[in-house]
Amino acid sequence: MKFSFWQILTAFFILFSLYSCENDLDKVKLYSKGQVIPTETAKSIKIIYSDSAKVQVEITAPILDHYSTENPYIEMPKGLVAIFYNERMEVKSKVVADYGIRYEREQKMEVRKNVIVTNEKGNTLNTEHLIWDEKKAKLTSDEDVKITTKDEIIFGKGFEANEDFTKYKIFNLKGTISINNPKND
């Protein structure tokens, strides 16, 4: 049985097409299971939010996935660092977390896992979940929180603060530990 050049070329093209679609078939499987996959993925990203040509916030992340769903969002599955600046471009506060997601329409960002917020005074907040409402310029959490200042450590369940973490309220206060530094005579 002889095969013509065109039959061989067609068979080769079909085999090549099936082989090269292997990754696409994996994506089709995700779609068929109802899972959403990112429309864009970027590595080593930097996002700058500004107002009147002045940088307000700078966010860096090793990976960013953008989802163009009915309610679009970006996800930073490998963590992020967000730095808030004052009008003189001095750091007002810093947020570090192992995971982040920003809902574009609501202008809200959620960070989770090992969340650490520090302000220019050196005060530190530790929690497992934090929401940054960009419209209200407010940070909130309903989780356990620990705030460490130079004088005390405060524990509570839930808190609310301005986005530069200079004014805050702690809810369901669990305890305060004063830190005394005895003077050596």
Image (spheres, helix red, strand yellow):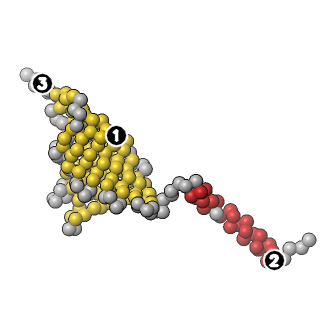
Q: Earlier in the sequence, mark 2 or mark 3?
A: 2
Where is residue 136 drawn, in percent x and y? Answer: 23, 55
Where is residue 63 drawn, in percent x and y? Answer: 43, 54
Tell me which residue sits at (25%, 58%) in the image: 135
In front of the other: label 2 or label 1?
A: 1
Tell me which residue sits at (25%, 63%) in the image: 50
- Res 95 visible: yes
Q: Amino acid at mark 3?
A: Pro
Q: Earlier in the sequence, mark 1 or mark 3?
A: 1
Identify residue for label 3. Answer: 182
Q: What SS does tag 3 mark?
A: loop
Identify residue for label 1. Answer: 128
Identify the mark at residue 18; answer none if there is no mark.
none
56 in relation to 170, above or below: below
Q: Amino acid at mark 1?
A: Glu
- The answer to whether residue 151 is left or right of residue 39 is left
Instruction: Name which quarter of the figure residue 59 lies in.
Output: bottom left
114 in relation to 9, above or below: above
Instruction: Name which quarter of the figure residue 142 lies in.
Output: top left
Q: What SS does tag 1 mark?
A: strand
Identify the mark at residue 5; answer none if there is no mark.
2
CA neighbours of label 3 inside 10 A, class few (<14), some (14 to 19), many (20+): few
Where is residue 111 drawn, in percent x and y? Answer: 35, 47
Query: Label 2 to label 1, Cα distance in Å?
Result: 64 Å
In-front residue for pair 163/185: 163
- Res 43 visible: no
Where is residue 109 drawn, in percent x and y? Answer: 33, 53
